[in-house]
Image (cartoon, grey):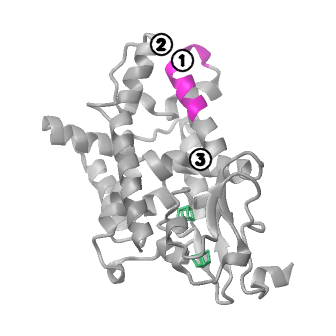
Amino acid sequence: MINTQIMLIKRAIWYIVGLLLFYAPFALYQKALFGLVNYNKPADIHSLCLRMPLLNLLLGKWSLIVPVVMITLFLFFMFAIIFGPFFCGRLCFAGALPEYLSRLIPDRFKIDWVTGINPIPVRYGFLAGYLITPFLAGSIACAFCNLSFMQRLIDGGFWGEFGVLSSTNIITFFLWIILFGIFTKGGRGFCNFICPIGAVQSLVYSISSRLHFTYKLRFAKDKCISCGACVKACSMGSLQKEPDNSITYQIHNCITCLQCQAACPKNALTYGTGKSGWKDGITLVNNEPSIQESIR
Ligand code: SF4
Ligand code: SF4
């Protein structure tokens, strides 16, 4: 319990660092990078948006891809390859805000979407739509983006610009903070089902975690007593306890936040390099074969 609280505080400090790094009026990362490449553009979360650069990359408009975006994309993918969804698990203030707010509400008032709806096809489906829509002459407005909304909230707090909030923003706010946030178990419904930035990182992590030198959530089956504390601590619903007492791990929505590691009383979960210890995303405890294993 104490470990869990300490981890929550540690993560909160990381998320505040993320706020200072990426959001105006601070935007320390953008300002440092802009200075480095002599790039003259307002420094806020919009200047890091990966959608238009990705589209320009796909359309072959190389001249529009400025160095700052290339450096950011490079760092983004390198971090995801080596450390997993590092941005989601440590730095994304917009993802952390509803998670932390939801901790103020008793669980009995929350919806457990993840056990009812498999988030993986939904989140990758959104990612595909996000990437394909511009090719179909469609447009995905910034008003649907929680990171953009976070910037607007900060702008409002600092400069009194709440007037820019439109009806679309209100829908985003309702989904992000209220329905999929405060009233969702774990508070990360938006991250789980909608966010394309998280989906890209998950896709990269699901492949790169197979490499020996990359960091991943590791499991030591022999230490696990199937207490379920990790399952309770996981805000993404990546860990589940099956009826046969096996613990299953869905790597495609894990954000490597390590709340599960802090909650485990037996140190069965660790974060590091080498083999993961998970068996195709499914592991067995108490030497009882899981349903999936029996079928194989
Ligand atoms: S499985 Fe662990 S590291 Fe992954 S999201 Fe859940 S609590 Fe965080
Ligand atoms: S991994 Fe740790 S917290 Fe999770 S069920 Fe096993 S012993 Fe409990």
User: Percent x, y for residue 201?
Assistant: 59, 47
Kind of residue indicated by mark 1: Pro
User: Percent x, y for residue 139?
Assistant: 46, 38
User: Percent x, y for residue 41?
Assistant: 36, 18
Give the Cα separation between the discs numbered 1 and 3: 21 Å
**Residue range (magenta):** 61-75
Asked if labels 3 and 1 touch by Cβ distance under 8 angstroms, the answer is no
Give the residue at mark 1.
67
In the picture as drawn, the residue positioned furthest to the right comes out as: 296
User: Is tag 1's residue or tag 3's residue first in the polypeptide sequence?
Assistant: 1
Tell me, yes or no, if residue 116 can be seen here. no
User: Percent x, y for residue 89?
Assistant: 49, 52
Kind of residue indicated by mark 3: Gln
Compared to 1, does 244 lie above or below? below
User: Is tag 1's residue or tag 2's residue first in the polypeptide sequence?
Assistant: 2
- Quadrant hosting ligand 1: bottom right
Give the residue at mark 3.
201
Mark 3 secondary-structure assignment? helix
